[in-house]
Structures are given as structure tokens and as C-alpha cells.
Image: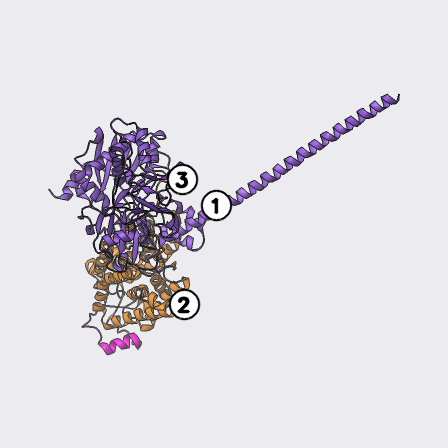
Chain colours: A orange, B purple
Amino acid sequence: MTAPTVASGPHTHAVFNVTRTMVAVMICLTPATVFGFAQFGLPSVLLFAVTVLSALGFEIACLAVTGKPVSRFAMDGSALLTGWLVAMTLPPWAPWWVGVTGSGIAIVIAKHAFGGLGQNLFNPAMVARAMLLVALPVPLTSWVAPVGLAGGPDLMASVAITFGGAPIYDAVSSASVLSTLKSGLDAGTSMADILSQTDSLRSQFVGVMAGSLGETSAMLLLLGGVCLILLGIITVAIPVSMMGTLFGLAALAHVIAPDRFPPPLFHVVSGSAMLCAFFIATDYVTSPVTSKGRLIYGAGIGGLIFVIRSWGSFPEGVAFAVLLMNAATPLIDEYVRPRIFGRTRAGKPLELGEKP
Amino acid sequence: MNLSSIAAFLNPVNLFSIRGGIHPETRKFLTAESAIEEMPLPKLLRIPLQQHIGAEAAALVKRGDRVLKGQLIGKARGPVSANIHSPTSGTVVAVGEFAAPHPSGLPVPTVTIRTDGLDEWGPRLPRLRPETASPAEIAAQVAEAGIVGMGGATFPSAIKLNLRDRYPLTTLIINAAECEPYLTCDDRLIREHAEEVADGAAIIAKALGVDEIIFAIESNKPQAAAAIAPFNHPLGLRLQVKVVPTQYPMGSEKHLVQMVTGKETPARALTAELGVVVHNAATAHAVHLAVRYGEPLISRLLTVSGRAISRPANLRVRIGTPVLDIINHCGGLTEDPERLLLGGPMMGQPIATQRVPIVKGTNGILALSASEARKEDMMPCIRCGTCVQACPCGLTPFEMNARIQSGDLDGAARVGLMDCVNCGCCSYVCPSNIPLVQGFAFARGKLAEKQSRKHQQEETKRLAAARIAREEAIAEKKRAAMAKRKAEMAAKKAAEAAAAQEAAK
């Protein structure tokens, strides 16, 4: 006979736990990541490995310093996922120290300084992205054209690029779609000319273009996102409201001034929008908990992305949009609550026959 | 015609919906096809005098008494209480304290009977003809028979039957949702004794004075729904089967009422205020036996299940049978169970020892293996919001938990702690395995303690003030009496002086 258990129900549990959730997200990220490797060659693989491993290293160090159970917490998958997301947002041929710095910012500053898993106010990967972008504008905007795994540098050359600081050949350096747009508009180029310089919407959707390591293929990110929804890990609220707002505002602007604003689908498939909609904005810790709150939050991010892309000083605004809405999350959760059974929204018991 | 289409056919009326809820693996297949067996009489029966909500019954027997089956051995005491009868014939060997079938295992007053194997009936209650009996007579018979809510709440049923005096009632809902995983005893009861259950429901409806009976069954029990369907006019009343979705906690009274009628019971109110009363299917069967045959509540159906039980079964068991005897009857345990429970896995209670007896509210004995319990180490809350989506009461469990952990119990109460029904959906889905419900129970206990301390302080203050006032009044009286006496004395003296003067003249 077991020792008496004084535990309240339930005495059984659903299958999902933190680790399984994190692993499922990583599996859903895999197609887009592998596509990134295939496009940008071995340097991107090395950068990814260095970023993810350093994230794990920082996690272990922080857990040890704060006196938390290292083996259990480090293996929960959250640090791996954070490192993975940081890597996804980096230029694929960035030097190793950019990845390590990004992981360090994400894990040490954005996560553990706030109290560790579940306590951070801001999305760690986006904090890293924003800080890197501000502090290291050059490495963070050095894009390369998709060279392919076979057509790319061999192992020695790749090691030189990632670890040796070898300069990126002019032949492969390229501009991302959004930076082309930004510089084009700043130079007064007409929208038709800019669009002819950028990749077609179809290749942007598939992802054959210059861009961050794991952000180029909107198609594969959408596939992973749909899997997350089908697995029940995320709900449709944030992706739908974010993309809907971004698309809606872009469409409106495009109708009003087609010369100044690109077509709405352009916004949806370029930059980090797709990664953000399914993998960044849906981060549990930093997003609201109710469906209505999530709709507001997603709409806020979509709107901010459009505003920053259109009028901000950076070509891409996802990281800033997410961070701004992260800051609004506690407020949203305080005011957008589910109605309690048998009570009005204000918390008073219903009157007999009253419709809530 | 397959079973699900029968279920759809039986459900011609529109249903409503409830918020949240979960879909745990039901695991009812372990016992769903096991016909009800009669459990043989054990050697000893231990019958707690408190098997219901309210005051414990007063023992009417003493050590050495011979008792007969159906004999009253515990008399209801006070307005909320229930009679207790001897489940078989035998000798009382002890009237004292014994471990309660409760996680605490604390001793409660218990009558222990050594059974004699004769199972000899004493005088039964007079039979009633529900066709002609008055509602008050039916309620009195149900009270006499010691019937309590058999879904687990154990609230004395007769009190619920008398609600007709206080509220205009329209509908009786028979709760046959049986939404807890594993449990199949209500399912089997309805499949095997549909006519009796329908009759019991009609008797309850007569007592309540309502003429609409809705029989609510979850969609995973199509055979039971089909079995009850032909008995749609018991005692001339209309009985309607409504197949509700399989969704935990469908059997929660207020949620079932919302699902079936679309009406939401206001917080802190009774469903009776909406004109709806809910009784369990097993209670209806007990009412049938009590009214038609004069049999008190001395046995009940329960499901014995879980991977650690060698032969899962649905049993009819006498009240007071020790858990150990029941488990042995089912072939014993195959392994050391991770959890040994009375009730279902969602809201059941772990027991400290197998020596405790089953009581009127015990609908299951579960021995869960580790693979069923899925107990894991707790992780920090990741604010995923799954608990918020799952909560059928519209609460924010993670937030309540955070407030409780930081000692802000009043804050937790402000965001809805007292509206929690303990269903366990939040804890079930929590990916961090946080024991949310346990935290809520703790916080409610603390708040109750605080409340009672406050009450005590106020009471002390009031008594002290009263005492001061009383003493003051006495002193005042004394002073008044003294003053009066003084005045009298002075008057007397003056009179005497005057008399003396007169005399001296």
C-alpha cells in the first residue's frame, strides 16, 4: 500500500506538458529552418548551431546562478526554442558572435533577469533582435542571395565566414525585399519600379529570396503554423487578427495611394510577418490569455508592423511591434477577462432571467 | 441504424452549450459492458453516522444489539440530516469512532455490524402508491428512507423535494451525464433498470409538482439513452431524453441546467430559482425502491475500475462494506496503485487506507496505475492560458493561483475564487502540472478560517460590551436603590425628628 496521498483532484492529467509543447513548436519550425539551410548553405547551419548551443549554455549558467534545478529546467526545451527563434531572425551569414550575443541578450537579460521561465514581460527572441538591430546595424542588415547548399561555400570557407570574420563577397551580398522597398521609396523610385526590382510575390511566398535565416519561406512557416493550430498548441486568434489587420491596413493604404504603398500581400509574405504571426506573437508567456485579449493583441501587432514599415526609420518593424504589444499584455489581461458563470461582466450576480 | 444515429434521433430538440470544459479519455470501456453484479455480504459492515451533508445521525443502537435488514440505526438530527439503516441483519459489535472514507482518514462516529449471513428483513416502511400519494407523503417517505444525492453530493434528497413550497418549479432534470471518466454504474443502472429509474424520476416529479422530466445523458452512452426512451410517460408525465455532448464537467448541476434549458443560474443561487431541480439517476432509482417497496437506502451501485484492479466491475454493494473487501472481490490489485480513490479521477478523493467503508455517495473505487495518473513534476506557470480556456466557470485559474502563492487571498477571492466548482479542468490541462485546484481549496480553507476568527473576535467584543453594559445596569440599579433608601431614611429621620419635636412641645 502506498503512503497516504493527501492530494486534491484531478488524479489524472492531459498528455501535454511544457517540454512536449516546446518540442512540438520546434518540430513545426523545422521545415522553414531546413529550407533556410538549403538556401543559404553551410554558414547558416554553423550560425544556427552556435546560436542554439550558446542559448542552452546561457540557460544552464543562469539556472546554476539562480539556484534552480539545472537538469530539469534546462531540458524543458524553452531555452532551445528561444535560441532557435533568435537564429531564425539573424542574417544567415552573420558572424558567430552575433548569434552568441543574441542568445545572451535573450536568455540572460530578457528571460532570467525577469525571473526565468514564465516571468518575462517581453519576448526574449524579439528583445535580442531589437537590441542587435540597434547596436549592430551593419551585421544585422548584411543579407546574402540564396546560393543553395551545393552552390554555397564549402566547409572551410563557411567556417571562415562564420568564425573567421571573412568578408561576404559582393557577388552574393544582396538586399532584403523590405530594405529594397525602403531605400527605393526614400530615393523617390516609383512603386512599379521598386516592385520590378524585388522578387515576385510567388517567390517571396515560397521563400527563394534574400532574408533572415528562417524567415524567407512564408509558405513553410504557414504550414508549421497550421500544424500548431491543429495540434491545439496555439489558437487562431493571434495569427488571424495580426495578419488580418496588417492586410487590411495595407490594402486600404494601397487603394488610397498605390504609388506610395505596396500591395497588401507584399506585407504578408515579406520580412518576419509570417514567423511572427505563428511563432513569435503566439508566445505563451508574453501574450494575453483570453481569446478576446489575443484578438486585440494580434490586431495591435499587425497595425504597428504596418505603421513602422510604412513610416518608421527601419525597413522591418516586427520586433518593435511585438515588444510594444508585450508591454500592453498585462493591461489587456487586467481588463479583458472572461465573464464568470452566473455573474455579469461587472462581477455582480445575474438577476433572475437576466441575459448576460 | 447505428448507435450514434439512434442518439441523434433521440435528440430532436435543440441544446445549448456550456463554456470551456475538457475531453479527457473516458476509459469507460473497462467496465461499460460489465453487467451489474451483487457483491456478497462482507463479514463486517462499518456504517458511518455521517454520510451526508448536514448534521450526523444519532445512533439508536448499542453494542450487542441484534439488528435486522432495513432497521433504523441512526436517526436524522436537525433540519439537514439523513436517516441511516442497517444494510443487513447481524449484531452490533461496536458503536464508536472509525476512520472516515475521506483523505484525512479522521475518525467519525461509526456503527460496526457483524453480519449473520441471513440477510433477514425487519419491518419495511409502508409502501406508497405514488399515483395517489401527496407530495408531502412522498417527501416524508424519501426522508424516512434516508435517501441522499447519490451522484456524490450526498445532500438529503427530501429537502430538495420540499423545494416546491418555496419556488415555482417547472422542470425536473435527471442527471445521467456521468461525465467522470471510468464510472459506468449509472450507465449500467439505466441500461438494466430503465423502467424503474423512469418510475423513480416520475415519483420525484410528482413530489416536486412538475410535469416535465428531462433525462440528460452524455452522447457516449447511446445504449442507456435508447433504454430509457420507451418509458416516456411514467405516471402519465412526459419524460424526454436529451443527449448532451460528452464534455466534462457536463454533470455539474448548474452547467447541465444551462446545457439543457439555456438558463444560467445566478451566482450564489439555486437552480430551483429558475424553476429547475436536478436529481441523479441513481437517486431516482433509490426513490423508486423506497416509495414502491418501502426499502430504505442500504445499498448502492458503484464502479470498481482502473488499471491496477484485476477485474474491473460494476457492483451492487451494501453501504458500509470496506473498500478492501470490494477490491478483493474484484480479484485484488495487480500493482501498487499510484492513486486509490473513492469517486472519479477528476473530483474523487484519495483514501488513506483500504479499511474505510463505502458510503451512500461513493460511486466508484478507482485504483489508478502510474500511467493513468500521469503525475509529473511541477514547472513554473508559462501563462499559456489553457486553464482560462478550459474553465467552465469563466475564471482565470493561473491568476488566482499566482495571487494565492503570493499570499493575496482576498485578491484571489476578488477575481472569482468563490465561484470555482472544483471540477479540476484547469489542473487537468495545465502543461506545467500545477496543482491549481489544491491551491484553491487551501485558499478557501484559509479564508474560512479568517472569517471565523473575525466572527469570533466580533462575538467576543459583543459579549464583552454586553457584560459591561449589564454590570453598569446592575451598578446603576444599586445606586438607585441606595439613593432611594437614603431618601427614605432621611424622610424617616425627618419624620422622627418632627415627631420628637412634637412630643417635646
Position of residue B313 in the picture relative to residue A72 (left or right):
left
Callout 3 and callout 1 share a chain? no
Of all residues, the one furthest to the right in this rendering is B505
In which chain is the residue bearing label 1? Answer: B
Front-most of residues A142 and B9? B9
- A69 relative to B368, above or below: below
Read off the magenta span. A149-163
Front-most of residues A115 and B316? B316
Callout 2 and callout 1 share a chain? no
Q: Position of residue B18 (x, y in %)?
A: 28, 43
Of all residues, the one furthest to the bottom in this rendering is A156
Q: Give the quadrant of the C terminus of chain B.
A: top right
Position of residue B463 in the picture relative to residue B24 (left or right):
right
- A119 relative to B221, above or below: below
Residue tagged 2: A67
Residue tagged 1: B452
Label 2: how many Cα within 10 Å (few below 14, some 14–19, many 20+): few
Label 1: how many Cα within 10 Å (few below 14, some 14–19, many 20+): few
Q: Secondary structure at mark 3?
A: loop
State the separation of the CA atoms marked 3 and 2. Answer: 44 Å
> Disc 2 residue type?
Gly
Q: Is residue A328 visible?
A: no
Residue tagged 3: A348
